[in-house]
Structures are given as C-alpha cells and as structure tokens.
Image (spheres, helix red, strand yellow):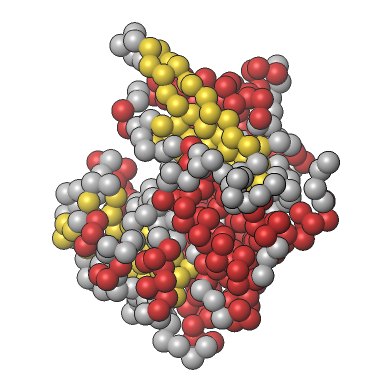
C-alpha cells in the first residue's frame, strides 16, 4: 500500500498540544537512538481508546451528560497503568498523550506495566460530593469492561484523589460481588492502599532533585548545595507540589515561593511550609497568607531561584514565557509542563531539566508497590516503601544520565530513550500478532 494513500492516523489523536509534544519527543528519541520505524510507528498511536458518555443526576434534579475517556497506549510490558483526570479541558487527544507518557514512564523505571490514562471533561470544583460520587461510579461502570487488576489499573491524577479511587474500587467490586482492591491504586489505606502512596510523587520529585544536584557537582558544574543557601519555587500546591515543599523544607532548603490556581506567595527568607499548609487546610487557598508577599503565577515562574518545580499542569513553560525563566534546575513535577520549544531553549542556556517521566515517576512506582502488596495480601511499612522507592528512582536517574552522556542529547530525550529501549526489546521478543 502506498504511503501517500495511507497515512498513519486520520488525525483523531493529534488535536492537543500535549499529544503533539509527546509525539515530537518520541520522534526525537527515535532519531537519536536509531529506532526501527516499524516500532516507532506503533508507538506514535495508542493501542485502544474508549470514549463514554457519563450521565448523572445533579443535586437540582436535572440530568447532565459528561464525556469520559480511557486510553490504553501500550500494554506490551503488562496491564495498563495511569491516572484518571477530572478537568474541564481534558479531551481524547490529551488523554492519549498522557497515556503515551505513562508507557515511557513505566518502562523507564522498570515496572511490569503498560501505559494508560483516563479522564472526564468536568470542572470538579463545581460538583457536590454526591455529584462527584455519582460521576465517578457511572464512569467506572462505563469503562468496566476494559479495566481490572490484570488488565488496566487506574489511579488518581489532576482533580481526583483517594476518595475517587475508593468509589471506583467499590463500583467495580459491587458489579462482580466481591472486593477487588487491585483494580485501582492510590486507594485509602483502610481498603488496601499503600503507606507512602499519597506522598510518593512529591517525595520522588525531591529525590530526583537531590540526584541532579549531586550529578552537577560530579561534572564540576555549579549545582545547588541543597542547604539553606539553596532557593526553590513551586508552581502548584496540591498532591505533588505541597508534598515536595514539605520534603524540601525538611532538608532545610529554602522554599521561597509557592502558588496554586488562586495566586502565589513569596518570602525571600523562605516560607514556613508547615505553617502555609495549616493556612491552606483552614482557608482552602494560599491567598491572604500573612507571612509573605502576594505574587502571580507568572511571577512565580520567573522568580530568581536555583530550582523551579512546575507541579501543577501541562504547558506552563512555553516559547512565550521561556525568556523569563531563571532557574538552573527545572524539575517537571507535573506531566508535560515544559513544551518542546521551551525545553530546547532552556537546555541551550545550560539549565538542567529533570523530565516528567523520571521526575514524577514516584507516584506510579508506589502504585505498583500498592498493587503488588494487594495481590499478596501482605503490606509493608512506610519505611520499606520509601526505601524501595528511593532505590528504583536512583537506578532510573543513573540510567538516564548515562544515556544522556552516551548520546549527548537532552535529558528528556535520554529519559525517553531509556523507556523506549526496554519497550522496543520487549516488543521485538513478543513479535507481531497474527
Ligand atoms: N497520575 C500519576 C502519573 O501521572 C500516577 C499514575 C499511577 O499511579 O498509576 O504518573
């Protein structure tokens, strides 16, 4: 069949920047490592996707239909794995791009899991608890046929948490008649969650920053000391950013700026993070915290700091604002916060980027631990979880910097090469069916 008559995709996947960025990154990694196009062409598109309508009755008695998705990008290495995102702008293409990143993330850190992602196009802040529960349950029921402990295992992502996972686990279990905790991870501890899962992504982010600092020193480059002389700014003060802030504060390193959707805080002497967390828990916002100056999210991103952690959402550092970014290390706590163009510009200026698939992999690593503990009905102490997490992340970091040195490429490309290389070998061994 001629190439001109038959192109790779009809275009259903490519409408979001996140997907386009993920494909560009894959192409770059494929070029640098000399990947067989027979493999890269398969990785450019997801294996399967399910789009569902999710009707629920709102508190006012009316019925509203939401759009939901579950995309399984690649399941060569094992069951699909990846979070469920509740966000007003999420769409099929974005979920497909995020599923692709999950494939590379799971492969890179050596998990026996494939990549998947789900989402509902909804603003969760507009839902009552009852509505959120109904939405989560009906969505679970609609995607029921493609998820399961040995098929595809969802977890929390932007806009969802342990409570949503409890509702998902309950719905899936009710439909089969017995408890099936292994269908999701990131569950509450009481129903089979793992100690340390809630903190794992933020904790992992900080591990990678410590490795990056040591790595820069080992190359004789000026790296942060990770003591009170080091300054950090964190964009996003949720499941990832707030935990990273806490961990950094405990290292006695200065978190000088934090922000959430409502705006940010700056204190050049360092914020008292436990106090900020208390304020946040009480007021549900950072706005008005007395011991700091109010700043905007844009100001936070351009703060003069040693380390910047974009830990909120994708596409925050772009060609438009990259000129104002001053940090020396940028740790991608969120998925896809730096666009490709911006990444190139930052790396050419000598910034050290810790790519998302490595930086935020702590979450899925401890999700894997949770799944394993659940399958064995044998649960570990938090110290054991953290020790194993640290070991997996240290190995992954080492592998990525070795690849980076071999190919003399950017860190994102090196991370993808690491993930794609393992996957490529597995795909070749399994062969093509039929
Ligand atoms: N949503 C998280 C991520 O993007 C965690 C996924 C998981 O634990 O399965 O990596």
Q: Is residue 130 visible?
A: no
The answer to whether 16 is drawn above or below residue 296 in the figure is above
Residue drawn at point x = 77 percent, y = 61 percent: 425
Residue lying furthest top: 61
Residue drawn at point x = 83 percent, y = 56 percent: 429
Residue lying furthest bottom: 220
Relative to the observer, which residue lies in front, 398 or 97? Answer: 97
* Quadrant position of residue 171: top right
The answer to whether 340 is drawn above or below residue 143 in the figure is below
The answer to whether 34 is drawn above or below residue 41 in the figure is below
Relative to the observer, which residue lies in front, 241 or 354? Answer: 354
Residue 122 falls left or right of residue 270:
right
**Count of numbered marks:** 0
Q: Is residue 221 visible?
A: yes
Query: Residue 205, position in %: x, y?
Result: 49, 62
Residue drawn at point x = 66 percent, y = 30 percent: 146
Query: Residue 293, position in %: x, y?
Result: 16, 60
Which quadrant would the C terminus be assigned to in this image? top right
Query: Residue 420, position in %: x, y?
Result: 66, 61
Residue drawn at point x = 62 percent, y = 40 percent: 72
The answer to whether 375 is drawn above or below residue 349 in the figure is above
Query: Residue 236, position in %: x, y?
Result: 34, 53
């Amino acid at each position: 069949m001629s190439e001109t008559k038959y192109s790779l995709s009809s275009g259903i996947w490519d409408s979001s920047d996140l997907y386009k960025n993920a494909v560009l990154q894959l192409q770059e990694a494929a070029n640098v490592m000399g990947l067989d196009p027979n493999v890269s062409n398969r990785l450019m598109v997801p294996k399967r996707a399910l789009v569902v309508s999710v009707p629920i009755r709102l508190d006012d008695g009316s019925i509203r239909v939401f759009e939901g998705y579950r995309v399984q990008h690649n399941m060569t290495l094992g069951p699909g794995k990846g979070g469920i995102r509740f966000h007003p702008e999420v769409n099929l293409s974005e979920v497909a791009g995020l599923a692709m990143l999950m494939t590379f993330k799971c492969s890179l850190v050596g998990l026996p899991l494939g990549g998947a992602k789900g989402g509902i196009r909804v603003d969760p802040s507009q839902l009552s608890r009852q509505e959120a529960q109904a939405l989560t349950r009906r969505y679970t029921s609609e995607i029921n046929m493609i998820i399961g402990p040995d098929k595809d295992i969802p977890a929390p992502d932007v806009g969802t948490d342990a409570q949503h996972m409890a509702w998902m686990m309950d719905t899936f279990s009710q439909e089969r008649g017995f408890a099936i905790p292994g269908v999701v991870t990131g569950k509450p501890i009481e129903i089979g969650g793992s100690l340390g899962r809630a903190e794992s992504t933020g904790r992992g982010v900080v591990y990678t920053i410590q490795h990056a600092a040591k790595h820069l020193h080992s190359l004789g480059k000026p790296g942060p000391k990770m003591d009170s002389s080091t300054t950090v700014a964190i964009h996003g003060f949720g499941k990832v950013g707030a935990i990273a802030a806490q961990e950094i504060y405990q290292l006695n390193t200065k978190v000088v700026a934090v922000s959430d959707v409502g705006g940010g805080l700056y204190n050049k002497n360092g914020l008292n993070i436990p106090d900020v967390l208390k304020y946040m828990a009480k007021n549900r916002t950072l706005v008005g915290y007395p011991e700091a100056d109010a700043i905007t999210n844009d100001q936070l991103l351009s703060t003069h700091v040693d380390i910047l952690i974009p830990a909120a959402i994708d596409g925050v550092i772009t060609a438009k604002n990259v000129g104002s970014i001053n940090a020396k290390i940028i740790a991608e706590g969120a998925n896809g916060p730096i666009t490709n163009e911006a990444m190139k510009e930052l790396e050419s200026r000598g910034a050290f980027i810790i790519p998302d698939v490595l930086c935020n992999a702590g979450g899925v690593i401890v999700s894997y631990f949770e799944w394993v503990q659940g399958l064995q009905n044998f649960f570990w102490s938090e110290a054991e979880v953290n020790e194993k997490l640290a070991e997996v992340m240290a190995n992954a970091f080492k592998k990525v910097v070795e690849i980076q040195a071999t190919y003399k490429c950017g860190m994102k490309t090196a991370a993808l090469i690491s993930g794609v290389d393992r996957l490529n070998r597995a795909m070749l061994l399994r062969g093509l069916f039929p």
